[in-house]
């Protein structure tokens, strides 16, 4: 499996990157449910995660800054032979705002030394634009709404997620039906289908240090964006690392387990192209442990993630 992950890293390192519709997170290794419903219930806990990202903060006064909030919660449900989850993401991009709400179910089955989750998500996506916040080059521009307009549409997703105690691999797709959202003024907002590949490996260096390399690939079929991440973990409590995103951007990652169940993370993105606009991201996660009525299966969750 380790050789497969190395091969994936090598092949994907040549992928060209450009902007996507779905929001990005530098701490994607802690945020799997946001894009892969197959990960629902993969931990032996009710797992909650909150992420807040401020992107292009140098452009805040011009209205081009991006603010994203993501809340996810999932839990294993034995009677359903899998897990359920809920993911909410709000993405404010200048004068526009997108809201996604998805409920997920993943059927879990044993596979080799791990477990495979086959998941689906069902929900809605809403798009809103406030035309009064724009500064048009000419008056009465027909492309710019005269006021606030919004619309919503049903949204579907699906994913496969495999994990053992040491590795995880996931493949998923969002916006399967490629919904077209119609605003009240008759204009339309087309949502493109997206594809995601995630993979990570947990490697012991010594009794106190572990290394967690991972990748995150997002594509709409025409363009793609690749993150290559690596965290060095001390005593399963404190971590620090870097993430490289083609663009190019470099993110500094750090965080700690405040308690066994509560973790706090921080990512600071540095744009290397010289545009002078960086990003900052906060993560807070808490796992509510579930009492086991029977012996735990040999298949375990990744120790750290």
Image (spheres, helix red, strand yellow):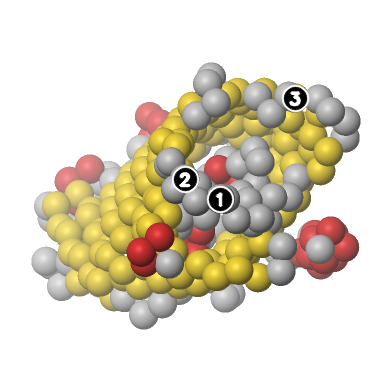
Give me the C-alpha separation between circle 3 and circle 2. 28 Å
Instruction: Name the residue rendered at 50%, 67% in the picture.
Output: 108
Task: Mark 1: give few (<14), some (14-19) or many (20+) Cα within 10 Å.
Answer: few
Of 239 and 303, which appears nearest the observer?
A: 303
Label 2, secondary structure: give it: loop
Q: Position of residue 304 (x, y in %)?
A: 64, 38
Residue 2 drawn above or below residue 179: above
Q: Quadrant of residue 12?
A: bottom right
Judge from the rendering whether residue 164 lies leftward or rightward of residue 27; answer left or right: right
Contact check, label 2 and label 1, Cβ < 8 Å: yes
Give me the C-alpha separation between circle 2 and circle 1. 7 Å
**In this view of the protein, can residue 169 be seen by the observer?**
no
Judge from the rendering whether residue 187 lies leftward or rightward of residue 57; answer left or right: left
Q: Position of residue 206 (x, y in %)?
A: 88, 30
Contact check, label 1 and label 3, Cβ < 8 Å: no
Quarter of the image with the C terminus in it: top right
Q: Position of residue 58 (x, y in %)?
A: 50, 29
Of 242 and 208, which appears nearest the observer?
A: 208
């Amino acid at each position: 499996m380790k050789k497969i992950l190395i091969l994936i890293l090598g092949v994907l390192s040549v992928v060209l990157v450009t902007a996507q519709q779905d929001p990005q997170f530098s701490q994607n290794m802690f945020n799997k449910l946001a894009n892969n419903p197959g990960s629902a219930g993969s931990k032996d806990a009710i797992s909650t995660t909150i992420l807040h990202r401020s992107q292009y903060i140098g452009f805040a006064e011009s209205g081009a800054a991006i603010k994203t909030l993501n809340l996810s919660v999932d839990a294993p449900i034995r009677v359903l032979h899998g897990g359920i989850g809920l993911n909410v993401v709000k993405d404010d991009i200048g004068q526009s705002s997108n809201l996604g709400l998805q409920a997920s179910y993943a059927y879990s089955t044993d596979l080799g030394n791990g477990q495979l989750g086959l998941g689906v998500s069902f929900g809605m996506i809403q798009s809103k634009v406030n035309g009064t916040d724009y500064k048009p080059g000419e008056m009465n521009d027909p492309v710019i709404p005269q006021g606030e307009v919004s619309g919503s549409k049903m949204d579907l997703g699906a994913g496969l997620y495999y994990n053992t105690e040491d590795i995880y691999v996931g493949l998923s797709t969002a916006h399967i039906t490629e919904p077209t959202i119609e605003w009240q003024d008759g204009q339309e907002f087309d949502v493109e289908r997206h594809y995601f590949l995630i993979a990570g490996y947990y490697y012991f260096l010594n009794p106190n240090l572990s290394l967690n390399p991972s990748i995150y690939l997002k594509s709409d079929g025409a363009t793609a964006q690749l993150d290559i991440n690596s965290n060095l973990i001390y005593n399963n409590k404190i971590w620090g690392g870097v993430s490289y995103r083609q663009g190019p951007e470099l993110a500094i990652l750090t965080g700690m387990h405040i308690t066994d169940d509560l973790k706090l993370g921080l990512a600071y993105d540095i744009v290397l192209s010289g545009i002078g606009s960086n990003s900052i991201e906060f993560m807070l996660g808490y796992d509510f442990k579930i009492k086991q009525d029977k012996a735990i299966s040999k298949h375990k969750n990744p120790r750290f993630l």
